[in-house]
Image: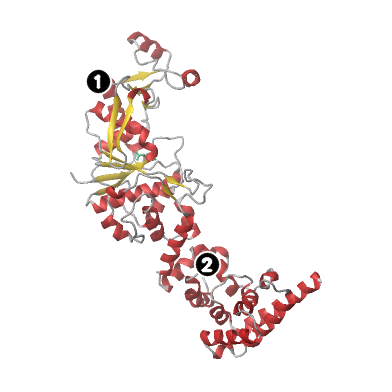
Amino acid sequence: MSVRVRYAPSPTGLQHIGGVRTALFNYFFARSAGGRFILRIEDTDQERYDERALRDIYETFDWLGIHWDEGPDVGGDFEPYVQSEREGLYRKHAAELIEKGLAYKAYETPEELEAMREASGGYDRRSRELTEEQRAAYEAEGRKPVIRFKVPLEGDTSFEDVVLGRVKRKNKDIPADPVLLKSDGLPTYHLANVVDDHYMQITHILRAQEWVPSGALHVLLYKAFGWEPPMYCHLPMVMGKDGQKLSKRHGATSAVEFRRQGYLPEAIINYVTLLGWAYDDSREFFSTADLEALFSLEKINKAPAVFDYKKLEWFNGVYIREKSDDELEELVLPYLTADGLVSDPPGDGELEILRGAMPLIKERMKTLGDAPDLLRFLYRDVHDYDITQAIPKKHDAGQTLALLEEAEKLLEGFDSRDDEQNEERFRVRAEEIDTKIGNLLMPLRVALTGSRVSPPLFGSIRLVGAETAKQRVARAKELLREHMATTE
Ligand code: GLU
């Protein structure tokens, strides 16, 4: 049978990076096995349903460039792919289980259930063996029943998991008789999920490990319906570096946050696919096309994966450097506009600066969001900065002023030399005055950019223009003098 897998998000929150990992594993598995990848929207929890979360699913995968073969937007042979449009099917199957004696109507009120939870920690199966008369009495009271599944009281249930091996659970440890159909006639996750996976002919279930405890219950449901369960493949947890489940405390967790910070889809796809999967011991870089060909279930790890933000940043830098200047310009521009550095739409002059700066900042950017700070000095004068940044280690302001004056002299005729020649000039002078070249460059860098971190200095001077550079040096000298006056 050819592989059919699904990503089945509930639109209750923004796409978590862990969810993206689940989707990618499903997608790459489908592609590498010549199968089909399906999107199914599990929106049966009306209270937590969020319209924005639904939009975010589409926007996230559009941005990543990941497309499903069947889904609400593209259709398919098993429509509809939205659970709220399939309610009749779930009701029919809940009724079928009642008929088989494998499910029952339960009439407890929320208050009664709460009291039960406090007394015994869960449902006490009170309605499991109601007589016809008792049921009629409840109905006469106007109570609306839920439908509960009769979990066998003895024995155990197990399933084979591609990653975890055989997973076995005692039936008495499965929560007592989970609700399948709520009193409003809507299904719970368990019923809808099992019914849909069956009717959509899903062959493999790749999902997060937090669903392992539901596995045995689902297998019992498949049995109750007389269906064959799909293969299970529960994916390793994603942790922060402290060994705790990845959460906001660690950093960004939603795909849209990473996107806003300026991560590239290529980097996210590559890095996230390595959370619990490895091709071999060494290879780290994979394009989407590589993964479509190379992904395999056998190489999924059991051990939890650690989300290393620094490593993702590094991946992102690598992918940024792979972009052509033109591509990068286009990617960076919205960040500059949002920051107010360039107008919207940008003027020709502003674009020209950007074009010139691209080769300089490409090497330094870890995310697209770094661009405004790296480029600010090109678009804005620098005056309100902390001049003490210009003071090299073991130097004072007076010595720094002298160094800056040296640097200023070295800038004479700057435009007639190339970067190498300029650098040589600084190097030679530094030797003559017995200092490190960095001590000549740092004060100049701060004067020019207002910061100790900037794109390469000589390229930056060229972009700003030697004239402006001189004015900024003059301003820095003034600031140093002021600083000396106030610290005397
Ligand atoms: N709707 C569930 C979720 O949001 C799907 C779990 C599953 O894949 O079975 O994670």
Q: Quadrant of ligand 1?
A: top left
In this view of the protein, can residue 87 be seen by the observer?
no
Relative image position of residue 224 (x, y in whole percent): 25, 26
- What SS does tag 2 mark? helix
Rendered position, 44 above or below 250:
above
Q: Amino acid at mark 1?
A: Lys
Picture residue at 31% right of the left edge, 55% below the top: 279
Instruction: Give the farthest residue toward the top.
Output: 133
For label 1, the crowd category at 10 Å Cα-Cα, with few meaning under 14, some 14 to 19 and many 20 or more, is few
Report the amino acid beneath label 2.
Answer: Ala
Residue at image coords 69%, 83%: 405
x, y percent for residue 210? 40, 38
Secondary structure of the residue carrying numbered label 1: loop
Q: Can you identify the residue that label 2 sits on? A: 371
Relative to 314, is 154 on the left or the right? left
Residue 261 drawn above or below residue 246: below
Q: Please indicate, yes or no, whether residue 352 appears anywhere in the rendered image.
A: yes
Q: CA distance from mark 2 to mark 1?
A: 64 Å
- Outermost residue on the left side: it is 1
Eyeballing the image, is 60 above or below 126?
below
Task: Identify the image quadrant of residue 6.
Answer: top left
- The residue under label 1 is 100
